[in-house]
Image (spheres, rainbow, N blue to C red):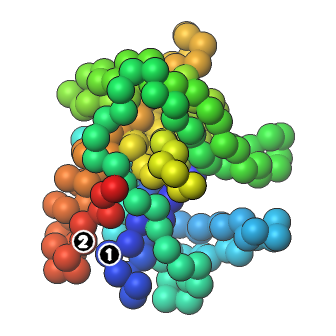
Amino acid sequence: SGFVVASNEDNRYVLTNHHVVGSSKMVSLEFQNADGTFKKYDNCRVLDVSKDIDAALIELPKDYSVKGSLGFLLKVPDETAGVYSAGCPGLGNDQIWQLGKGIVSNSVVVKDGNKMIQHTAQVDPGNSGGPLLVKQGKNYVVVGMNTLKAFNRENTGLSITSSDIAIYLKTYENYGDKTYAPKSL
């Protein structure tokens, strides 16, 4: 899974986990349309990876036609705040969209030197790289990126914080030239 981040209307990117793209230089991206059909983009360039925070940035092709991207909330939600995991884990051989609901169970956990949000929203294999969201009014905003699931515990997902994502995006060398700043709300 992954989600669209944008510097401006001409430059759109997908953010996902490093462990999702591995050592690939090019990947295929597939988006589900509102009517249930899929649009696939082949040979999308992996622009940058960070093994430190397990992040990867992928360039969308110029003919990518969906407008907009998700906003960021750069504050970690309080414990017991409602959160949503979004992604496309598989069900058998089928790709299935999934929105899971849970709470923040530990607002900051340090794992491998990184601050992470521990939550109970559903995270299955295939959710890696998808956003962890909170609802603000009628919209959802990103508070993290789903990265890990504890297999020896139930309902324990870990997400990279949106503030660490913002630091990663700002330090990506080409982003500086495009004056990227996450839309914080």
Q: Which quadrant is the C terminus positioned in?
A: bottom left
Q: Mark 1 points at which residue?
A: 7
Residue appearing at x 41%, y 85% in the figure: 9
Cβ–Cβ below 8 Å for labels 1 and 2?
Answer: yes
> Which residue is more in the foreground, 48 or 105?
105
Residue appearing at x 53%, y 79% in the figure: 67
Which amino acid type is marked by label 2? Tyr
Q: Residue furthest top?
A: 152
Residue 64 on image: x %, y %: 56, 83
Q: Residue furthest front?
A: 137
Residue 93 appears left or right of 66: right
Up/down of 137 relative to 37, above or below? above
Residue 5 appears left or right of 139: left
Q: Quadrant of residue 112?
A: top left
Residue 38 on image: x %, y %: 76, 70
Up/down of 139 relative to 115, above or below? below
Residue appearing at x 34%, y 49% in the figure: 73
Residue 180 shows which numbered tag?
2
Up/down of 147 relative to 183, above or below? above
